[in-house]
Image: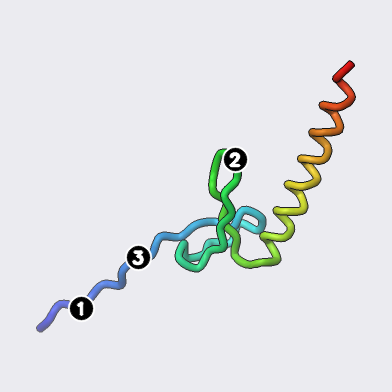
Amino acid sequence: MAPTPKPIETPRVACEICLKEIPQSEAVSAEARDYVAHFCGIGCYRVWAERSADRNTAGSEQTQRRQP
């Protein structure tokens, strides 16, 4: 009797927004400053991009207030 082939496990990553596990090969990725973020689709990527833009805007406003 021939051995039954075992399925090959594909690397999986969690979506940065909804935490859904997806195959790494199908993930949309965006390189951030210190890490790479993975997304299950364009919808989650857009949410992440909007939040990132909001944080950058808030950070630059605080920096401007501190300067004399």
The residues bearing labels 1 and 3 have C-alpha atoms spaced at a distance of 15 Å
Local SS, label 1: loop
| Residue that mark 1 sits on | 4
As displayed, is residue 7 above or below residue 67?
below
As displayed, is residue 60 above or below residue 1?
above
Query: Which sits in the foreground, 4 or 8?
Result: 8
Return the residue found at the far bottom. Answer: 1
Q: Mark 1 packing: few (<14 Cα in 10 Å), some, or many (20+)? A: few
As displayed, is residue 6 above or below residue 49?
below
For the point 26% across and 72% down, which residue is it? 6
Which amino acid type is marked by label 1?
A: Thr
| In front: label 3 or label 2 | 2
Q: Mark 2 packing: few (<14 Cα in 10 Å), some, or many (20+)? A: few
Query: Which sits in the foreground, 17 or 3?
Result: 17
The residues bearing labels 3 and 2 have C-alpha atoms spaced at a distance of 30 Å
Which amino acid type is marked by label 2?
A: Arg
Looking at the rendered image, the quarter that the N terminus falls into is: bottom left
Return the residue found at the far top. Answer: 68
| Residue that mark 3 sits on | 9
Q: Position of residue 65 (x, y in %)?
A: 89, 24
Q: Position of residue 21 (x, y in %)?
A: 53, 61
Q: Mark 3 packing: few (<14 Cα in 10 Å), some, or many (20+)? A: few
Local SS, label 2: loop
| Residue that mark 2 sits on | 33
